[in-house]
Image (spheres, rainbow, N blue to C red):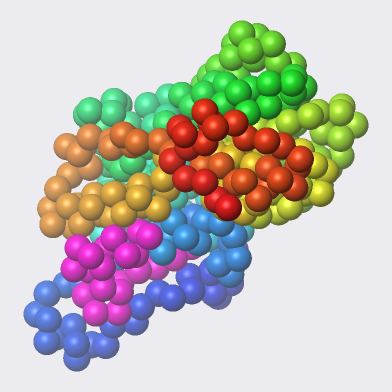
Amino acid sequence: MKRREFITLFSGAAAWPLAARAQQGAKIPRVGIISPGRSDGSDTSRATLDSLLTGLRQLGYVEGQNITIERGFGESNADRLREIAAELVKRQLDVIVAFSTTAARPVKQATNVIPIVGFGMADPVEDELVASLARPGGNVTGTSFLGPELVAKRLQLLSEVLPQHSRVAVLWHPRAYGDGTMTGMVKEAEHAAQILGMHLQFVPAASSEDITNAFSLISRERADALSVFPSPILFAEYGRIASIAADKRLPAIYAAREGAEAGGLMSYGANLPDLARQTAVYVAKILKGAKPADLPVEQPTKFELVINLKAARILGLTITRDILLIADEVIE
């Protein structure tokens, strides 16, 4: 990647006037943000980025006043993420915030010195980002959204809402996380499916370009429901996935509420905007001198079930009162 091309990726990096710096009498902290999403802000991940910035403002860090933020976007391309990670490390920033394990891994490979705060990591221990959740032990800490642990729960919820649907397609990105994490997720899903009497069809999609072909395979196998595995790449495409699933009249459950908000039937998982604001707390602590090795990885304590009744009506489904009573939010 040419330097000029790289600089254009860092949209919104604040330029702090020299006079203002002198007036402050202190070094302005420089924070890098690396995301697998798109730089034009057109994908689902934009809301989580905004929530992180909101969290920083609430903690007294205002971009353009007392903090400089440099952004890099992978545009759903793993090679570009590695290039951005290398360039961020060269800039010798005070902290690098990595959105998801997908972004944290190339940054970790590029530096063991600069503090890294991972947002919404799947299994940071299995993915070799930290030594343990309680004692990270290196230069990485942050928040986890418990991706692998909730795979079976989503299939269970899907079976409760759709008791007559047994052929479930699983849309997944096989390299979203480390091999151990992905293997664990598949095993959890297969074990749950055996108990629930489901037949699973795993359909890979490693990029946005793969999604159309993935749905062609799903239709060919006559799946009657869909579960979307956790993945930063797929998360960024929730709007498109929900639209295609609706066109094919395919009930779907997603790993985050953004899937239901985009028109999907339901979702179950951590609230990612809340997790982003929680991540901002760790950024602030490190800027004030805390060491990542001493900050335990934070895990969500609450998971939300979101039901989209409008989507249910379009699909001709009736959501039982029992399901509606346990839902944290119902979209009318």
Tell me where the magenta segment starts and ends, as one range. 51-72
Judge left or right: residue 222 versus residue 27: right
Residue 175 sits above or below residue 12 on the image: above
- State the residue at coordinates (56%, 42%): 307
Residue situated furthest top in the rendering: 195
Is 262 or 300 nearer to us in this picture? 262
Say which quadrant the N terminus sits in: bottom right
Please tell me whether residue 10 is drawn above or below residue 302 in the rendered image. below
261 or 131: nearer the viewer: 261
The x, y position of residue 17, in whole percent, is: 27, 88
Most extreme residue toward the front is: 321
Q: Quadrant of residue 135?
A: top left
Frontmost residue, 182 versus 306: 306
Tell whether 4 sits left or right of 196: left
Q: Is residue 8 left or right of residue 51?
A: right
Indicate whether 218 appears above or below 1.
above
Residue in the image at 18% along x and 83% along y: 21
Identified at 35% across, 36% down, the residue is: 302
* 64 in the magenta segment: yes
Task: Give the side of residue 27 with respect to residue 195, left or right.
Answer: left
Question: Which quadrant of the structure image shows residue 29?
Answer: bottom left
Look at the image and say whether residue 301 sits in the magenta stretch: no
